[in-house]
Amino acid sequence: MDIHALLATLFPNGHEVAVDGALVHGTATTAAAASVVVVGTAAAVAIDAAIALALAGRILAALEGPPRPFVFLVDTSGQALKRHEELIGLNAYLAHVASCVDLARRCGFPSLSLVYGEAVSGGYLSLGLMADRAYALAEAQIRVMDLKAMARVTRIPLEQLQKLARESPVFAPGAENYARMGALQAIWAVPTAALLEAALTDLLRDAPAARDTRIRVGHQRGGRQLAEPAMATVARAA
Amino acid sequence: MIRSFFGATARERVAHLLDAGSVIEFLPPQESAPSPHLARLGLPGALDDGVVVGSATLEGLPVLFAAQEGQFMGGAVGELHGAKIVGLLARACAVRPRAVLLLVDSGGVRLHEANAGLIAISEIMRAVLDVRAAGVPVLALIGGLCGAFGGMGIVARLASHVIMSEEGRLALSGPDVIETVAGVEEFDARDRALVWRVTGGKHRLITGDCESLVDDDIAAFRAAAAHALHAGVAPAFTLAHLLARQRALAERARLLAGLVDGLDVWRALGVPDADEVPMRTADEMMSVAAEMEH
């Protein structure tokens, strides 16, 4: 979905969100939270160190103001695949973005993310999946790797992967699978201001005690049967 | 006697890194079952799903540990593997050991369980930061076959303190992934010296992504971890820390703009006699790093 159309739909009360190349940043007015800080990416950009720094910079700048929620708008094809990026330590830049989101949560700035385009691997890990609540549009493409590439790398026939993908949410791309596994709170058929308002209301109600409940949700929804009991056994072993 | 960290299994590392007789494993193989996701694909599993988690002492201090087995599925994170680490980190928030040691040896997400692996890594990321916020340091030890790549490369960088050997590798995308997508001229994954200059322990010490460089010897990792615990390592992140890191990472990107080889990075960062880096010992490199800070 086009970022400008998305912004107009989500924030009918007005917004001052700029789309600077691939960087999305600004503030918007909502009923649930008055002002929210909007940070994200557009055009399915591959996240490199420069974009990671820009994202982190916007989050840190907001932390110097009064507490309010973040809305992360996610459209990324993953991390930039370049030797230079690895050389300078792209993992450190992505870890920095994640640390900023985490600190924000602890400072009274809860966050929700919405995948409105693509969300792939490292690009999704550092921002969208660090939010307190994650959402996606039904048309969103969320994946680690598409099935064809997965078949090539794992040397498992594509037909076998396609057949298994119909039975199990564990490896195949798709927002529905991420919802079943507990990573997505909900999938929005189409974006509306009302859905965002409701999500912000939920976020503000639950956020002060925000814990990572995704393993439990994934268990309740039947997408991850192993994780919850294993985690609990290790956490509580005598 | 030198016992290589690189060539050891996860269980051998645990046995020799931590105090003899102190190790208690949680969810040990006899109480666990291999991944049904792998079984469905006709692949052999492992009873511990490629990670050993438990409690122990290090020079008498109570610690929790997770050790990934690089020799099983490249140490990659699947549903069960990830959940064991998340459970260990949750336990750390409750029992407050002196530290959590993460013996990272992983290519990142296990593709056969890609969604579960990606979600688990994001849960590990949050949980590591929870542990740090609870005042418990997290140490990442990297010196195995598979290094620390993919999401585990991000996790390692969230740790309070990173200990690497020269043989250790720390990055995000593996060289083979970059070569496959962007071509051999972008990154020749078979050029081992190049891979080492871009991701290896000495390079990471110089870029500031690793605090301790040690020899490829489990005893040296043990000594560095114990030293870090006694000396005290970075507390949880504060806004001031993250603002300082923002400036440091921006400065790094500016200084290293356009570079594609470690040797050029070492020169740009002012390492004396940068050409000599491959010949230097871990101790010599630690002295070089200390001088660079001044």
Image (cartoon, coloured by chain):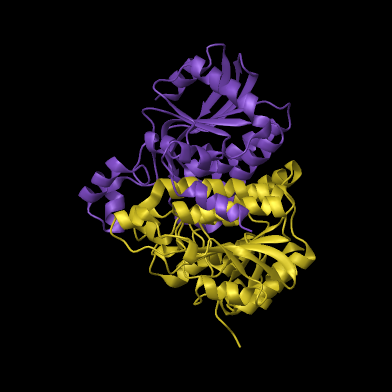
Q: Residue at x 38, y 46 (%)?
A: A170
| Relative image position of residue A238 (x, y in whole percent) | 64, 59
Q: Is residue B66 visible?
A: no
Quarter location, residue B209: bottom right
In the visual, does A205 lie left or right of B177? right
State which chain is coloured purple: A
Q: Quadrant of the C terminus of chain B?
A: bottom right
How far across and how far down the image is residue B81, in percent?
Answer: 48, 56
State whether residue B219 appears in this view: yes
Q: Which residue extends farthest bottom?
A: B1
The residue sitting at the left extreme is A159
Label the yellow chain with its letter: B
On screen, residue B2 above or below B179: below
Residue furthest toward the top? A13
Which is nearer the eye, A133 or A12?
Answer: A133
Viewer-nearest residue: A228 or B158: A228
